[in-house]
Image (spheres, helix red, strand yellow):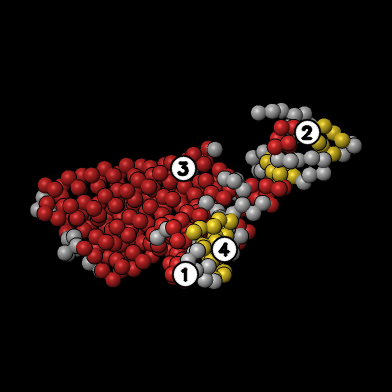
């Protein structure tokens, strides 16, 4: 770290000198343009204009060297780290074989579209700028999807409704899509100062939304797992087991709502502490029910119901993680 004294120039302008080694490293001389990013936390970030304007988000892939699964992982990975343009080339001149796969991939990546295709190359480009993205609204939308998925998945198990279960499974794609969008823009803020300014949140706030979205995406994944239990089960749980599963599901969703509210709407932080207490009660209760299942007449089916209870417990744990984040953000 270096320190500099602020100077008053001409009676009206404050000036501060730049470290010489930094200026030389970035080819900054008299007359060079710098970008300044003032933050609400009192910091001022300085970036060389050449770096800010550089088109460093273009990547070329040789499609002849990878299979479809690898192509999917590569394009998705490039999307998540903030790449704006992807050139997919085939030296054999058979790019049409990859086009179908790429078109399927970009349907799950918000903002990505195929712009150009010829026999040698296919170009995918991002058409959504951060000015048109609301990280807050995207996270709120993800919470709603995860919440309704979880409620419907439990209902599908208790009513043995396989149609509803398959609908829950289909909705997981939308949850994944929203999480990828939040993840992409958060990762871009790690290297792009302009992205932070466009999204209108501090890096600490953006990390909180990213972490929250990650927990919600996992909750949606467990809703999908619960839905698969509904499809595979020979019959719905009955009697006391059915009532307890329904109760644990309601409590878990209440926990998630209490945990997320202080982050998404800046409500009373006391809700986060309530959520942590709810987590303890839910995990303890599920543990006791799981033990009883293995010791009761349900023992032959205990494994299947155990998968259901495990997903309910994981949901409560993720809600607890969110509550812990809310408390950290409150006192940050």
Quote the CA–CA distance across marks 3 and 2.
39 Å
Quote the CA–CA distance across marks 1 and 3.
49 Å
Q: Secondary structure at mark 3?
A: helix
Residue located beneath label 4 in the image: 125
Give the farthest residue toward the left: 297
First in sequence: mark 2 or mark 1? Answer: 2
Q: Quadrant of residue 225?
A: bottom left
Tell me: 297 left or right of 65.
left
Q: Secondary structure at mark 2?
A: loop
Asked if 216 appears above or below 10 in the picture, the reply is below
Q: Where residue 158 sits in the image (x, y, percent)? A: 24, 63
Quote the CA–CA distance across marks 4 and 3.
34 Å
First in sequence: mark 2 or mark 4? Answer: 2
Quote the CA–CA distance across marks 4 and 1.
20 Å
Q: Which numbered mark, 2 or 4, is in the foreground of this view?
A: 4
Residue located beneath label 1 in the image: 94
Q: Nearer the viewer, residue 88 or 53?
A: 88
Q: Secondary structure at mark 1?
A: loop
């Amino acid at each position: 770290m270096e320190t500099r004294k602020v100077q008053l120039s001409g009676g009206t302008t404050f000036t501060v000198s730049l470290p010489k080694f930094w200026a030389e490293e970035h080819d900054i001389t008299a007359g060079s343009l710098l970008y300044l990013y003032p933050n609400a936390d009192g910091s001022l970030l300085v970036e060389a204009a050449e770096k800010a304007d550089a088109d460093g988000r273009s990547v070329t892939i040789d499609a002849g060297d990878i299979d479809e699964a690898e192509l999917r992982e590569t394009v998705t990975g490039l999307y998540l780290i903030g790449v704006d343009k992807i050139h997919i080339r085939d030296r054999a001149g058979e790019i049409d074989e990859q086009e179908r796969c790429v078109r399927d991939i970009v349907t799950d990546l918000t903002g990505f579209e195929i712009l150009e295709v010829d026999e040698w190359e296919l170009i995918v480009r991002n058409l959504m700028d951060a000015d048109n993205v609301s990280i807050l609204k995207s996270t709120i939308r993800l919470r709603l999807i995860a919440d309704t998925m979880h409620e419907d998945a439990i209902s599908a198990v208790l009513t043995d409704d396989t149609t509803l279960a398959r609908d829950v499974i289909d909705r997981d794609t939308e949850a994944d899509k929203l999480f990828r969008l939040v993840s992409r823009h958060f990762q871009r803020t790690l290297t792009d100062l302009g992205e932070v300014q466009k999204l209108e949140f501090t890096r600490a706030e953006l990390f909180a939304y990213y972490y929250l979205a990650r927990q919600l995406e996992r909750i949606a994944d467990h809703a999908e797992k619960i839905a698969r239990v509904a499809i595979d089960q020979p019959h719905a749980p009955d009697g006391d087991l059915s009532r307890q599963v329904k109760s644990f599901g309601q409590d878990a969703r209440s926990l998630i709502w209490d945990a997320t509210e202080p982050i998404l709407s800046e409500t009373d932080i006391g809700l986060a502490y309530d959520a942590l207490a709810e987590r303890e009660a839910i995990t303890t209760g599920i543990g006791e029910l799981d033990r009883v299942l293995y010791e009761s007449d349900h023992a032959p089916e205990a494994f299947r119901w155990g998968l259901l209870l495990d997903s309910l417990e994981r949901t409560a744990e993720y809600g607890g993680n969110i509550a812990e984040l809310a408390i950290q953000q409150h006192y940050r």
